[in-house]
Image (cartoon, helix red, strand yellow):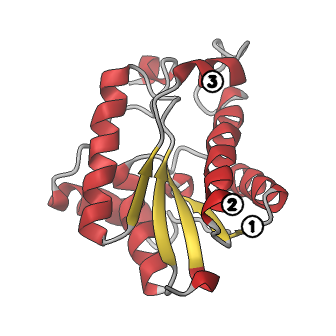
Amino acid sequence: MDENKKLILHICCAPDATVPGEELLKEGYVTTGFFYGSNIHPEEEFVKRADAVRSLCLIKGIGCRIMEYDPQTWISATEGSASEPEGGKRCPLCFELQLRAAAGHAAEMGAAYLTTTLTISPHKDPQVINKIGEKVASEHGLQWIHRIWRKNDGFRRSVEESRSLGLYRQDYCGCIYSIRNR
């Protein structure tokens, strides 16, 4: 294993990881997927998404780490933001919580690189995500791989591939508040 190319890929959901997982492997990164998911509500939804992430990692031949479901940590981190709309002030708090967990895991595993699948979504601000990623990666001595995965039809390709693989595709971002936007 080339330790210099060891990377943790923060995975928000299996469909969004299809294109990034494949691209990173092509680029020679020794990739491990990291699924946090404590923002997801209800727990049954977390289980569906975690199972889909496991399946995708197996198909793609990448490592997989699923964190325990701990919604209280997410609730505490986003306290006071219940009335925020999707894409409002709560989302960057959620991104930071997830990316901090991924960065901590990357540091523990001796990885040199960190990136996320979050930027494949047309509903999320990639500049905000990459700025948070750069900050938490730097704090953990990691190099952030700055990507906007939705470029070059990344989102469309992820939808097509996840459907062809039969992966579970959710219809909301994940948190209890995003359910109202379905």
Tell me if I can see residue 16 in this picture: yes
Q: Position of residue 166 (x, y in %)?
A: 16, 53
The residue sitting at 52% across, 18% down in the picture is 177
Question: What residue do we see at 52% from left, 29% from top?
Answer: 39
> Which amino acid type corresponds to the residue marked 2 in the rendered image?
Ala
Looking at the image, can residue 125 be seen? no
Q: Which mark sits nearer the N-terminus, 3 or 2?
A: 3
Residue 102, x across and y down, in percent: 61, 51
Q: Which comes before the other along the chain, label 2 or label 1?
A: 2
Question: Would you call the spot at circle 1 few (<14 residues within 10 Å), some (14-19), or many (20 or more)?
Answer: many
First of labels 1, 3 by sequence position: 3
Residue wearing tag 1:
142
Q: Is residue 144 above or below residue 168?
A: below
Place residue 153 in its image quadrant: bottom left
Q: Does residue 150 appear left or right of residue 5 in this picture?
A: left
Closer to us: mark 3 or mark 2?
2
Relative side of 59 to 151, left or right: left
Mark 1 belongs to which amino acid?
Answer: Leu
Q: What residue sits 25% from the left and 55% below the top?
A: 55
> Would you say the residues marked 2 and 1 are in contact, meaning their CB atoms lie under 8 Å apart?
yes
Q: Which residue is mark 3?
A: 73
Q: Amino acid at mark 3?
A: Thr
Q: CA distance from mark 3 to mark 2?
A: 20 Å
Which x, y percent locates residue 11? 47, 52
Side (left or right) of 84 relative to 55: right
Q: Which mark is residue 77?
A: none
Q: Residue at x 73, y 12 (%)?
A: 80
| Distance of label 1 from label 3 (alpha carbons) | 24 Å
Crowding at label 3, few (<14), some or many (≥20) Cα neighbours within 10 Å?
Answer: few
Residue closest to the eye, 160 or 56:
56
Q: Give the image quarter of residue 18.
A: bottom left
Q: Which residue is mark 2?
A: 107
